[in-house]
Amino acid sequence: MTEPVNICEVGPRDGLQIAQTLMATDAKIRWIAAMAAAGVREIEVGSFVPPRVIPQMADTAEVVRRSLEIPGLTVIALVPNLRGAQNAYEAGAHKISTPVSVSEGHSRSNLNRTPAESIVEVSRLVDWVKVQPRRMEVIAGCSTAFGCSIDGVVPTAKVVEVASGLARAGVDRIMLADTVGYAHPAQIKEVVRAVREAIGPVLYGLHLHDTMGLGLANALAGLEEGIRAFDSCLAGLGGCPYAPGASGNVVTEDLVFMLESMGFETGIDLAGLMAARRLLHEGLPAEPMQGQVAKAGIPKTFRQAA
Amino acid sequence: MTEPVNICEVGPRDGLQIAQTLMATDAKIRWIAAMAAAGVREIEVGSFVPPRVIPQMADTAEVVRRSLEIPGLTVIALVPNLRGAQNAYEAGAHKISTPVSVSEGHSRSNLNRTPAESIVEVSRLVDWVKVQPRRMEVIAGCSTAFGCSIDGVVPTAKVVEVASGLARAGVDRIMLADTVGYAHPAQIKEVVRAVREAIGPVLYGLHLHDTMGLGLANALAGLEEGIRAFDSCLAGLGGCPYAPGASGNVVTEDLVFMLESMGFETGIDLAGLMAARRLLHEGLPAEPMQGQVAKAGIPKTFRQAA
């Protein structure tokens, strides 16, 4: 009777990219393995970006290779361009995620190109991936789809335009990302409806930040529009180095708590996530960890769906 | 075109009752006046309980009297019984709020009587209030309506039973309170529907806590069921001394941000609330203050409805 919701843990990528200290490769693997043991089936484990840009991601090829040894885990890597996709393919990633900013300002700041130029790059990337012998799914993330700390308001029509361009480019799935946490529930519903109207089921999920405290309310709005896939970060790590004011992702533990309480099935064991938090803290002791469930404890009324 | 939502600030009562240090009367008044200046039209300024039980509330009569001098402000006081109602009436409170626990465990712990005995007490209280020359509205709060950290699950039928008893007792309005923050959005919808089915428009609003991080998601669920009144606390203060594990109320600033972003009209100026936070901090420097809007700053895309 329970309906599944897919959670993709993006902590080892989005969560670490603005961390103040480096997390050792062994510590990353222990943390990733603990989340997989808790039932997390998809993890974005790193990004193939130049190490001088984000030193925290310099070991991504090794992290991908070692993550592939964890049974049942789908290993995802972020790539900014074709070169990154080739590196991810070589390392063996099951899926890649590539960001395309909807707003011009964030696009210039993050990728040094316009959204239209990004769509052309994604098209080249998809063409390359599709002729490789091994299948590798391509997910495109529409960054700043609900507002931009550089450009301000992002019109819904612009999100539809970028998402439609990405769908035409042949990506398998599209995520709408609230990169700076400006979204509100009514906007989530409006944008999801408009994008689905344009591209149908290629619209897959939401990547939400809790900057203004609306992360879970926005997830609820997405759920009510039929969204069944979310990115999130253990302990609410995360942020974007190219989006001033951006802060942590929606907290995986709290999202799992909400979904399972409502009767959705995530396949993720909440107590297991608490254990994974301890490994995260061991590997990155200086980083503040968020999360209300961890702070308050799992309430006695809580029952997992599964 | 905008639809109003009523926010009752309960910080000076719910927020202070578990604070570690006492807030001076003058500081309370400055804080209350700053919130009123920001547009908050209803404030629960204290409770008429024995000072030995909650020393923080010993000055409630004076706080009520001085709050009455603030133009346009509706002054509310919490009362646990008829004696408290008489004191509130004498001090001049516009409205009183009286808590009745739905769960037996919390009822015993908080009020030392059963829910049924509480309803009898509320009935006596209402009968007394109604024959006074001055009108004073009586609000009943159904505590632990969504779960109890002592008893665990609270059946919806039990909430309906208590709310129906209170409606028969003649209270003007009923709030459903998630005292320990166990509620989830699907449950909010279910309970609101069931209680409204039983008592109609006497069901007025929701009093939510953010213990598990679901405060705003639960508020959204309430909004979607037609609820247009919420209690909240500036800086997310709050908790119940008789409910183990209870923590802060939903954050007024973040709730106002969500509502105004969605196009609802609260009449409350967000920048004014930020100023009120400074006075709260001055009056209670040791108390940690929550709130994502205060942490992140008001985003450039934000426009107030009014």
Image (cartoon, coloured by chain):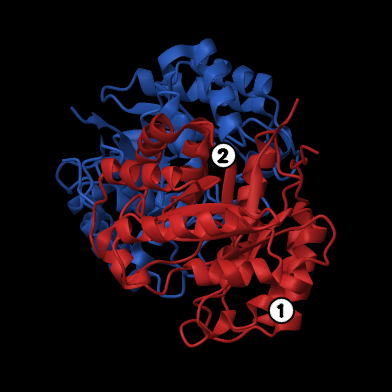
Chain colours: A red, B blue
User: In this rendering, would B254 be left or right of A21?
Assistant: left
Image quarter of the C terminus of chain A? top right
Where is residue A305? Give x, y as percent.
77, 37
The residue that mark 2 highlights is B178
The residue that mark 1 highlights is A62
Q: Which chain is disc 1 placed on?
A: A
| Nearer to us in this view, B257 or B233 | B257
Compared to residue B305, the image places residue B187 above or below, namely above
Q: Residues within 10 Å of mark 2 (few under 14, many from 20)?
A: many
| Nearer to us in this view, A80 or A298 | A80
Closest to the camera, between mark 2 and mark 1, is 1
Q: Residue at x 65, y 27 (%)?
A: B115
Compared to residue A169, the image places residue B138 above or below, namely above
Q: Are marks 2 and 1 on the same chain?
A: no
Where is residue A153? Give x, y as percent.
24, 52
User: In this rendering, would B174 be left or right of B242?
Assistant: left
Q: Give the amino acid at mark 1.
A: Glu
Q: Helix, strand, or loop for circle 1? A: helix
Find residue A300 and report its image quarter: top right
Q: CA distance from mark 2 to mark 1?
A: 47 Å
Q: Residue at x 49, y 16 (%)?
A: B196
Find residue B235 and report its image quarter: bottom left
Q: Residue at x 59, y 30 (%)?
A: B186
Can residue A162 be seen here? yes
The reply to whether the C-beta atoms of the residues labelled 2 and 1 are less than 8 Å apart is no
Q: Residue at x 59, y 52 (%)?
A: A130
| Nearer to us in this view, A84 or B121 | A84
Where is residue A165? Give x, y as percent.
37, 46
Q: Helix, strand, or loop for circle 2? A: loop
Image quarter of the N terminus of chain A? top right
Q: Give the amino acid at mark 2.
A: Asp
Q: Which chain is disc 2 placed on?
A: B
